[in-house]
Image (tube, rainbow, N blue to C red):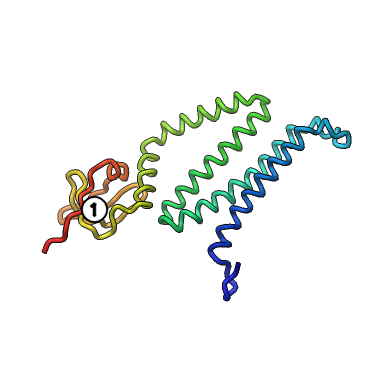
């Protein structure tokens, strides 16, 4: 749909990536289903030796289209509910998950061994998880803070032993300003601690 000015409405800008994602996934599944039964069609018998190659090309192309449009949809929806910083982070996470699934499937096709793909994907996930455990912990906590907004800019709060005015809220930290110092408190600490909102002095 278009506004009177000719610009696309927010609804259409949200629906388009979602529709593209669904069509790409449906096309992907349909083509894979067809290639798995090439032997049943005499006319397409010459393609049987290239079944794996066709599957790889189809998954790589349509999978890429699905991931790109899907992550665009995630970003658009997230941007309406959270900050741009959080929306970008969610888009990156969704993109990593999408391409991880594509990579695992391609490995299973090339090696003709689904177990190898699952093992490789699990190992890569464990390595990435341990390597980014602290960062991801702060990031996830920051996403929750951005969605539920327990505090706002300018509020005087106490977290643990630190008291000050909220000067900034980022994905990784909450910044408190006091008369003597500026303190950066990790988002995960904020989520896991008692947060006190101090009343303004009269």
Helix, strand, or loop for circle 1? strand
Q: Give the left or right position of residue 20, taking residue 137 as reference.
A: right
Give above or below for 61 relative to 83: above
Q: Give the left or right position of residue 164, taking residue 5 as reference.
A: left
Residue furthest left as drawn: 202
Q: Give neighbour class at mark 1: few <14, some 14-19, many 20+ (Cα, 10 Å).
A: many
Residue furthest bottom as drawn: 4
Quarter of the image with the N terminus in it:
bottom right
* Residue at 64% in and 29% down: 108
Pinpoint residue 58: horizontal percent, then vertical percent.
70, 41
Total tally of numbered discs in the picture:
1
Considering depth in this image, is 135 or 195 the residue closer to the camera? 195
Q: Give the left or right position of residue 25, taking residue 159 as reference.
A: right
* Residue at 23% in and 49% down: 183
Which residue is under mark 1? 176
Residue furthest right as drawn: 43
Pinpoint residue 97: horizontal percent, then vertical percent.
53, 40
Pinpoint residue 45: horizontal percent, then vertical percent.
86, 33
Considering depth in this image, is 96 or 20 the residue closer to the camera? 20
* Residue at 60% in and 57% down: 16
Quarter of the image with the C terminus in it:
bottom left
* Residue at 62% in and 45% down: 64
Pinpoint residue 155: horizontal percent, then vertical percent.
23, 58
């Amino acid at each position: 749909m278009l506004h009177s000015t000719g610009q696309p409405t927010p609804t259409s800008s949200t629906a388009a990536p979602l529709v593209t994602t669904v069509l790409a996934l449906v096309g992907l599944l349909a083509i894979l289903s067809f290639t798995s039964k090439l032997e049943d069609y005499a006319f397409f018998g010459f393609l049987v030796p290239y079944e794996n190659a066709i599957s790889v090309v189809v998954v790589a192309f349509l999978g890429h289209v699905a991931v790109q449009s899907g992550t665009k949809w995630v970003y658009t929806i997230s941007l309406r509910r959270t900050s741009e910083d959080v929306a970008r982070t969610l888009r990156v996470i969704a993109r990593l998950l999408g391409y991880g699934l594509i990579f695992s499937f391609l490995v299973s096709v090339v090696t003709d061994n689904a177990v190898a793909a699952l093992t490789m994907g699990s190992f890569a996930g464990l390595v990435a998880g341990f390597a980014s455990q602290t960062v991801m912990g702060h990031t996830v906590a920051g996403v929750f803070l951005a969605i539920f907004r327990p505090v706002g800019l300018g509020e005087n709060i106490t977290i643990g032993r630190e008291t000050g005015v909220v000067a900034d809220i980022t994905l990784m930290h909450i910044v408190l300003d006091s008369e003597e110092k500026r303190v950066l408190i990790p988002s995960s600490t904020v989520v896991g601690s008692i947060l006190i909102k101090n009343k303004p002095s009269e």
